[in-house]
Image (cartoon, rainbow, N blue to C red):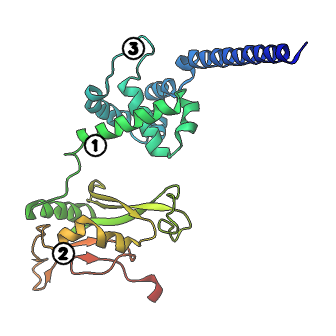
């Protein structure tokens, strides 16, 4: 066989081999997708909802009643029409995979094994659902804006925790991230990993009143507070905090305060415990 014929034969063999591999891949994908209805985590969610309420809460990080409330809010915006090519994810499926992603921090590649969804589909569902959650919950988390609203917060602290001049509890939380390109040590925190920081203020019932997220992890909790829009509003006198009050017929006036741990700086309206270093 001359060189030309050998080349043609080799080309044909490569084409046949490629088609065979593609056929196997398509068959594997079809088998994998066919098992989706019986193997994915959505069936597990439905099972836990009916039989194991505590396990449902552990898996979804909320009770079914909260899940259903969220679902009722996002469903009108997440419904998509099926196409002749594929069936669209339901709003419930989108919300469930998004909550699992937010609760666990697992990659889309990892989540595909429990959801039996392709990473690209998970990515689209998470982005769509997060944007929808921000939209439908924009009035859910509100920072008090009047003196009366702040007094109501303090009254709750007085009834529940015996601290009648407390306006909220402040703290920061490091959220681990993959180091951004060319970031150096900018996001490297004292705990030994790269992060951004979530700063939060909660009331006596552990409900969020303010959240500020995004500062690089190298900054201390006190620094995060200093750079936050919340504290800038405080320093400009825009929070409308109530005036100091008398307690139990005492002549002293006690200021309303936020409470935080020793990582924060003491201030006229910010109370923290005595430093353990000096105790």
Front label number (3 vs 2): 3
Residue at horizontal 16 percent and vertical 77 percent from the top: 255
In the rendered image of this protein, does residue 171 appear above or below residue 1?
A: below
In the rendered image of this protein, does residue 235 appear above or below residue 15?
A: below
Residue at the far bottom: name it: 278
Q: Which mark is residue 83?
A: 3
Mark 3 vs mark 2, CA separation in Å: 55 Å
Q: Do the numbered discs 1 and 3 sit on residues whose CB atoms are within 8 Å? A: no
Question: Percent x, y for residue 27?
Answer: 65, 14
- Going from N to C along the chain, the mark reached first, 1 or 3, is 3
Q: Do the numbered discs 3 and 2 sit on residues whose CB atoms are within 8 Å? A: no
Mark 1 vs mark 3, CA separation in Å: 27 Å
In the rendered image of this protein, does residue 151 appear above or below residue 236?
A: above
Residue under numbered circle 2: 235
Q: Seen in the image, is 34 located left or right of residue 100? A: right
Residue at horizontal 12 percent and vertical 68 percent from the top: 238
Indicate the quadrant where residue 174 lies.
Answer: bottom left
Residue under numbered circle 1: 134
Which part of the image, by quadrant, shows the N terminus?
top right
Residue at horizontal 10 percent and vertical 70 percent from the top: 242
Indicate the quadrant where residue 28 lies.
Answer: top right
Q: Is residue 165 visible?
A: no
Residue at the far top: name it: 84
Indicate the quadrant where residue 236 lies.
Answer: bottom left
SS state under label 2: helix
- Going from N to C along the chain, the mark reached first, 3 or 2, is 3
Residue at the far right: name it: 1
Mark 1 vs mark 2, CA separation in Å: 28 Å
């Amino acid at each position: 066989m001359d060189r030309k014929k050998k080349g043609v034969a080799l080309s044909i063999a490569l084409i046949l081999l490629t088609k065979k591999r593609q056929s196997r891949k398509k068959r594997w994908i079809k088998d994998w997708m066919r098992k989706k209805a019986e193997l994915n985590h959505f069936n597990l969610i439905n099972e836990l909802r009916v039989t194991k309420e505590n396990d449902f809460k552990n898996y979804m990080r909320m009770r079914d009643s909260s899940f259903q409330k969220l679902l009722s809010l996002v469903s009108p915006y997440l419904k998509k029409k099926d196409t002749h090519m594929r069936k669209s994810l339901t709003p419930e499926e989108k919300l469930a995979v998004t909550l699992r992603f937010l609760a666990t921090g697992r990659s889309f590649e990892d989540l595909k094994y429990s959801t039996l969804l392709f990473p690209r589909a998970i990515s689209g569902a998470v982005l769509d659902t997060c944007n929808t959650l921000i939209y439908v919950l924009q009035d859910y988390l509100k920072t008090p804006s009047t003196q009366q609203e702040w007094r109501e917060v303090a009254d709750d602290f007085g009834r529940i925790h015996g601290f009648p001049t407390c306006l909220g509890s402040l703290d920061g939380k490091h959220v681990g991230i993959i180091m951004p390109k060319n970031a150096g040590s900018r996001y490297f925190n004292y705990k030994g990993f790269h992060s951004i920081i979530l700063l939060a203020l909660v009331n006596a019932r552990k409900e969020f009143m303010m959240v500020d997220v995004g500062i690089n992890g190298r900054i201390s909790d006190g620094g995060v507070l200093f750079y936050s829009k919340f504290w800038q509003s405080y320093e400009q006198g825009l929070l409308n905090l109530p005036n100091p009050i008398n307690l139990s017929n005492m002549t002293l006036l006690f200021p309303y305060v936020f409470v935080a741990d020793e990582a924060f700086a003491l201030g006229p309206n910010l109370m923290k415990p005595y430093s353990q270093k000096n105790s």
